[in-house]
């Protein structure tokens, strides 16, 4: 029984997304580096999402930072738990991306987490 319980825990950990990077780690990222970040959308226009970086407190609680990001999401970007129609002001997104320059990245996958998280002001 203990082996099955341990196996279940290991599988859950393997399937869980990696923790989101914090504001400082994102600021240090260099072009070409993979990013995992959470943002609150300020605007979305012509495949570009502008938003504020959120720092993780728990899996369901985040704190708003002063850092902003411009995230390019081309038409073939994978959306999970939602669609591009869900990307609007105030939406919370978990973004898998590649840094392109300071405060900018190209999205490879976007998970809509708005209904599952709370955001606190600093």
Image (spheres, grey):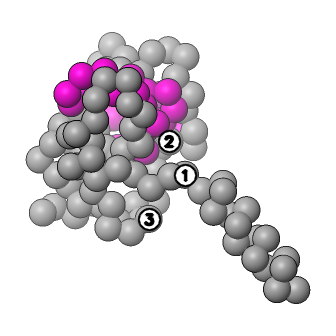
Name, please, the residue furthest toward the right.
1
Which residue is located at x 23 percent, y 60 percent? 63
Cα separation, mark 3 vs mark 2, equals 14 Å
Circle 3 crowding by C-alpha within 10 Å: few under 14, some 14–19, many from 20: few
Residue 122 in the image, given as x and y percentages of width and height: 12, 63
Q: Which mark is residue 59?
A: 3
Circle 2 crowding by C-alpha within 10 Å: few under 14, some 14–19, many from 20: some
Q: Is residue 109 shown above or below 64?
A: above
Counting residues from the start of the chain, the first of labels 3 and 2 encountered is 3
Q: Disc 1 marks which residue?
A: 17
Which residue is located at x 70 percent, y 72 percent? 9
- Residue range in magenta is 82-110
> Label 2 near label 1: C-beta < 8 Å?
yes
Q: Is residue 79 shown above or below 100?
A: below
Which residue is located at x 39 percent, y 38 percent? 35
Q: Is residue 3 shown above or below 72?
A: below
Counting residues from the start of the chain, the first of labels 1 and 2 encountered is 1
């Amino acid at each position: 029984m203990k082996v099955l319980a341990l196996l279940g825990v290991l599988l859950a950990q393997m399937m869980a997304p990696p923790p989101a990077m914090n504001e400082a780690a994102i600021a240090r990222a260099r072009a070409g580096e993979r990013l995992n970040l959470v943002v609150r959308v300020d605007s979305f226009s012509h495949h570009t999402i502008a938003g504020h970086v959120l720092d993780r407190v728990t899996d369901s609680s985040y704190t708003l930072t002063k850092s902003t990001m411009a995230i390019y999401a081309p038409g073939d970007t994978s959306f999970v738990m939602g669609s591009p129609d869900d990307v609007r002001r105030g939406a919370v997104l978990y973004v898998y991306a590649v840094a392109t320059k300071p405060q900018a990245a190209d999205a490879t996958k976007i998970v809509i987490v708005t209904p599952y998280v709370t955001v606190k002001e600093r």
